[in-house]
């Protein structure tokens, strides 16, 4: 979408936050929040947002992994540090999604990822 004004970005971010809140209230972590997994309906703001691709989702209620066998574990530019370290995979909590959301916030408002600053 390119750089958005705060007025354009806020409704989009609110919808994303509500989608994550829905997952978190059910003890689920998406683990692959990135632009490709955010579907926008409409040609201009305000968009209707749909969160997609639940192939890496993790349940916090039990040890059952809902991730597809052999799946890549996230997208590096949006991954929280604990996602990159297999020894810390048990530390993945809803804040992992919030980390990715904040990378997206930066990208929407500044028009590039924070790591490129």
Image (cartoon, rainbow, N blue to C red):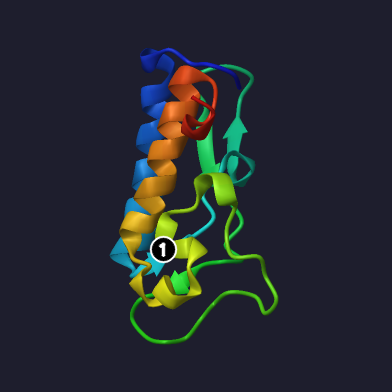
The tally of labels here is 1
Does residue 62 appear left or right of residue 84 in this picture? left
- Give me the residue at 57% from left, 58% from top: 74
Q: Is residue 11 visible?
A: yes
Residue ID for mark 1? 82
Where residue 55 sits, quadrant-wise, is bottom right
The image shows residue 87 at horizontal and vertical percentages of 44, 77
Label 1 Cα neighbours within 10 Å, binned few <14 / some 14-19 / many ≥20? some
- Which residue shows up at 34% across the image and 68% down it? 26
In the foreground, 114 or 11? 114
Q: Which quadrant holds the N terminus?
A: top right
> Residue visible at 54% across and 77% down?
66
Residue 14 pos. (x, y %): 35, 34
Under tag 1, what secondary structure? helix
Residue 90 x, y percent position in the rendering: 38, 77
Asked if residue 22 shows in the view, the reply is: no
Q: Residue 61 falls in which quadrant of the image?
A: bottom left
Percent position of residue 41, x then y: 60, 31
For residue 85, side relative to residue 41 (left or right): left
Nearer-the-camera pick, 6 or 25:
6
Q: Residue furthest right?
A: 70
**Quadrant housing residue 40:** top right
- 1 lies above or below 20: above
Q: Is residue 38 placed above or below 69 in the rendered structure?
A: above
């Amino acid at each position: 979408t390119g750089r958005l004004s705060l007025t354009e970005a806020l409704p989009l971010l609110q919808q994303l936050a509500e989608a994550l809140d829905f997952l978190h209230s059910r003890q689920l972590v998406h683990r692959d929040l990135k632009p490709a997994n955010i579907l926008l309906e409409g040609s201009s703001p305000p968009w209707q947002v749909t969160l997609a691709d639940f192939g890496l989702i993790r349940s916090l209620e039990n040890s059952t992994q809902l991730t597809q066998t052999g799946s890549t574990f996230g997208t590096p530019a949006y991954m929280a540090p604990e996602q990159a370290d297999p020894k810390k995979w048990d530390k993945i909590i809803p804040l992992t999604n919030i980390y990715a959301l904040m990378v997206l916030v930066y990208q929407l408002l500044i028009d590039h990822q924070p790591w490129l600053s």
